[in-house]
Image (cartoon, rainbow, N blue to C red):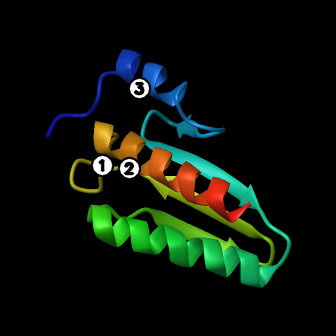
Amino acid sequence: MPPIAEEKREQLLLELNEWEIIDKHHLSKSYQLKNFKEALDLVNKISTTAEVENHHPDIEFGWGYVRVKIYTHKIENLTESDFVLAAKIDKIQLLTS
């Protein structure tokens, strides 16, 4: 599975809500929440989606924040499925807000 072309990355990024491409390697987004419970709830919802998609992001969280990092581990780069997962995570967060 080859990495997605840089031109296509930028095009797909425009369809996402506040995600960034870091070092041409991964997608990243941070969420600010009201407290630890809300952060944990978001992490649990993201993990459920990740299991369904069989595509697992790196997640860091604590009191009032969640940081998500997505890339295709097998190739250490971005593929279209990374952008699909990011869009699904955006939908989760919109439903949670």
* C-alpha gap between disc 3 and disc 1: 15 Å
- Graded by Cα atoms within 10 Å as few (under 14), some (14 to 19) or many (20 or more), the crowding at tag 3 reads some
Q: Nearer the viewer, mark 3 or mark 1?
A: 3
Q: Residue at x 30, y 51 (%)?
A: 72
Q: Report helix, strand or loop for mark 2.
A: loop
Q: Report helix, strand or loop for mark 3.
A: helix
- Mark sitting earlier along the chain (2/3): 3
Q: Residue at x 79, y 78 (%)?
A: 63
Picture coordinates of residue 91, whole percent (x, y): 55, 51
What residue is disc 3 on? 9
Q: Report helix, strand or loop for mark 1.
A: loop
Q: Amino acid at mark 2?
A: Tyr
What residue is disc 2 on? 71
Picture coordinates of residue 4, whole percent (x, y): 29, 29
Residues at circles 3 and 1 in contact by the CB criterion of under 8 Å:
no
Q: Is residue 74 visible?
A: yes
Residues at circles 2 and 1 in contact by the CB criterion of under 8 Å:
yes
Q: Amino acid at mark 3?
A: Arg
Picture coordinates of residue 25, whole percent (x, y): 42, 40
In the picture as drawn, the residue positioned furthest to the left comes out as 1
Q: Which mark is residue 76?
A: 1
In the picture as drawn, the residue positioned furthest to the right comes out as 34
Residues at circles 2 and 3 in contact by the CB criterion of under 8 Å:
no
In the picture as drawn, the residue positioned furthest to the top comes out as 7
- Mark sitting earlier along the chain (2/1): 2
- Graded by Cα atoms within 10 Å as few (under 14), some (14 to 19) or many (20 or more), the crowding at tag 1 reads few
In this rendering, is residue 3 above or below 77?
above
Q: Nearer the viewer, mark 2 or mark 1?
A: 2
- Mark sitting earlier along the chain (3/1): 3
Quarter residue 20 falls in: top right
In the picture as drawn, the residue positioned furthest to the front comes out as 95
